[in-house]
Image (spheres, grey):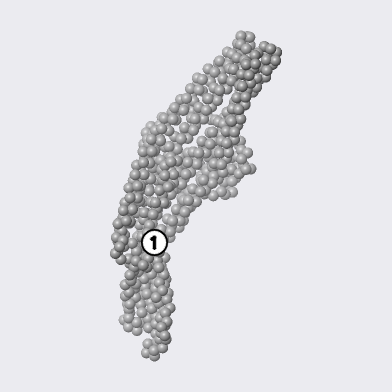
């Protein structure tokens, strides 16, 4: 008899118990192909249909991001699994005006390849979930044997009984794994939103810094030109003229580096937005948003991170899935495969008395635990559980520490930027006004006025850098409280494959 092997039943490890019935002209038992097909149909109806639901995943990811996430936007800013006409029209509309931080995040969520990759990975997980919740396919076997004038036709229909019995557990475990995949997709989207905000802040700050450095270079060029005139007239020494020319050269070099940094930061933002060459001519605002007048109080920063962070929740969900996988491994430690099937054999001879005879019966196959008692699989499942538990603790420690660090940086950068805005720049402006009065009263030279202008430009650049650092720290704090650490996300994804095999091979 020819019998197709099942994926969960290696033939080298199994023995068969054949229960053959009498020929068809004798006493017949009620079990037949029709009965087995009826049972299979009833099980199919009871199990329901497991289908892939990408729209449900999209809504779930949006709900996981929450109102406090870096990607918490509404309307056309919902993450798009694939670009469509509506999304492209929304991006074109956003690019008509100077792109602010919110518009940048909207564009990234609408058409960034990283969002599309995250949803494609989530769709793979959803397909695995649907496959795990589907009844195992029956195995049909057919054989045709001839011996002399005798012809025998064998037919068998087998079912993976163990797969059928463990189907509810497999469906629940696949659902838990899919929930982990949703959390990981939400982490990737939140990370993209945070990266986009940081890139936007750096691009605008670099563009703003270039404008001020150009003013400083112009002042240095004016000073160098005057120095050359003074030296030519014999009023200045070569040393004094060289010092001014050195300031001019240094200002030009700083401007060149700033312009290159502005181009690099803009291109980084363009890559995160997923813009084409034609769309890369977008405009940015002239300056960063103003500082908030005061910082809101953030109580229980550590508790918020442990409760809301996506990587902590993903590690906890993965621990639950690993625990269930260990339970199935223990339950199927000795017998990890079991098949039952209906068999019908027909024989044809030229015997006048018995030209045809039919035999019906049941076939059962299961492995004999002679060599493998399941110790290795049990030890592996236990090790994976301990690994997941340790990962939960490590992720929680990291989340709490990063939340405290990000909150401290958020407060410090605001204090520094606010001091520049409230004290340093007003005092510098007052010095400039006094120097201009002294110059108008012929109490100060043009060189002192130019030196003061250069010092003012440096103070303005420092103030812009402090403002930039605050908005970067604000984005980091938002991600540390609700999103995930990049190191934690990569570690979680790296161990995902090992955990996914905890319940395999049954």
Q: Position of residue 433 (x, y in %)?
A: 58, 15
Residue assigned mark 1: 47
| Between 121 and 94, the one nearer to me in the picture | 121
Which residue shows up at 49% across the image and 28% down it? 292
Quadrant position of residue 334:
bottom left
**In the rendering, at what x and y percent does residue 353 appear?**
37, 89
Which quadrant is the C terminus positioned in? bottom left
Q: How many marks?
A: 1
Identify the residue at horizontal 39%, vertical 33% (top origin). Answer: 404
At numbered mark 1, what does the secondary structure look like: helix, strand or loop?
A: helix
119 shown above or below 265: below
Q: Is residue 40 visible?
A: no
Q: Which residue occupies the extreme bottom position in the image?
A: 352
From the viewer's perspective, is residue 257 above or below residue 275?
A: above
* Vertical arrangement, residue 485 with respect to residue 175, above or below: above
Left/right of residue 112 with respect to residue 336 in the rendered view: right
Residue 52 visible? The answer is yes
At a point 63% along the width and 38% down the height, the residue shown is 281
Q: Where is residue 134 shown, x and y percent of the image? A: 41, 61
Relative to residue 25, is residue 402 depicted above or below?
above
Q: Is residue 141 left or right of residue 95?
A: left
Q: Which residue is at the front of the view, 413 or 291?
A: 413
Could you classify mark 1 by the number of other residues whose Cα lies within 10 Å: few (under 14), some (14-19), or many (20 or more)?
some
Q: Quadrant of the N terminus?
A: bottom left
Farthest residue in the right direction? 233
- Foreground residue, 55 or 200? 200
Residue sitting at x 53%, y 30% = 289
Considering every residue shown, the one lying at the far front of the view is: 238
């Amino acid at each position: 008899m020819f019998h197709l092997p099942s994926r969960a039943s290696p033939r080298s490890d199994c023995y068969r118990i054949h229960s053959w019935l009498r020929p068809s002209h004798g006493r017949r038992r009620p079990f037949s192909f029709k009965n087995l097909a009826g049972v299979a149909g009833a099980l199919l109806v009871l199990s329901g249909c497991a289908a892939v639901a990408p729209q449900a995943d999209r809504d779930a990811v949006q709900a996981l991001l929450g109102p406090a996430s870096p990607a918490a936007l509404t309307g056309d800013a919902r993450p798009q699994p694939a670009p469509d006409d509506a999304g492209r029209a929304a991006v074109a509309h956003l690019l008509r005006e100077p792109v602010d931080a919110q518009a940048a995040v909207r564009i990234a969520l609408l058409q960034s390849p990283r969002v599309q990759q995250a949803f494609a990975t989530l769709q793979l997980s959803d397909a695995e979930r649907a496959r795990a919740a589907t009844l195992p396919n029956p195995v049909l076997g057919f054989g045709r044997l001839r011996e002399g004038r005798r012809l025998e036709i064998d037919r068998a229909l087998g079912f993976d009984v163990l797969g059928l019995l463990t189907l509810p557990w497999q469906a629940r475990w696949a659902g838990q794994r899919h929930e982990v995949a949703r959390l990981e997709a939400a982490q990737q989207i939140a990370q993209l939103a945070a990266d986009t905000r940081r890139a936007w802040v750096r691009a605008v700050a670099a563009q703003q810094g270039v404008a001020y450095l150009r003013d400083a270079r112009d002042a240095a060029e004016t000073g160098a030109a005057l120095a050359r005139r003074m030296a030519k007239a014999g009023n200045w020494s070569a040393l004094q003229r060289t010092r001014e020319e050195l300031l001019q050269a240094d200002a030009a070099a700083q401007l060149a580096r700033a312009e290159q940094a502005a181009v690099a930061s803009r291109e980084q933002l363009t890559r995160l937005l997923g813009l084409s060459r034609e769309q890369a001519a977008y405009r940015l605002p002239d300056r960063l948003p103003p500082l908030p007048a005061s910082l809101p109080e953030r109580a229980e920063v550590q508790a918020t991170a442990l409760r809301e962070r996506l990587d902590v929740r993903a590690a906890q969900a993965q621990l639950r899935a690993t625990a269930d996988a260990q339970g199935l491994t223990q339950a199927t430690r000795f017998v990890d495969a079991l098949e039952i099937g209906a068999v019908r054999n027909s024989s044809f001879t030229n015997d006048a008395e018995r030209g045809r005879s039919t035999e019906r019966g049941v076939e059962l196959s299961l492995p004999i635990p002679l060599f493998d008692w399941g110790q290795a699989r049990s030890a592996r499942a236990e090790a994976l559980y301990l690994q997941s538990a340790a990962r939960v603790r490590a992720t929680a420690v990291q989340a709490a520490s990063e939340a405290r660090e990000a909150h401290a940086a958020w407060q410090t950068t605001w204090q520094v930027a606010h001091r520049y805005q409230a004290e340093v720049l007003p005092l510098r402006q007052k010095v400039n006004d006094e120097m201009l009065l002294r110059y108008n009263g012929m109490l100060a030279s043009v060189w002192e006025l130019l030196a003061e202008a250069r010092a003012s430009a440096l103070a303005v650049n420092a103030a812009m850098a402090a403002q930039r650092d605050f908005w970067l720290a604000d984005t980091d704090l938002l991600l540390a409280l609700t999103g995930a650490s990049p190191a934690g996300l990569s570690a979680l994804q790296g161990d995902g494959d090992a955990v996914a095999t905890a319940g395999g091979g049954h």
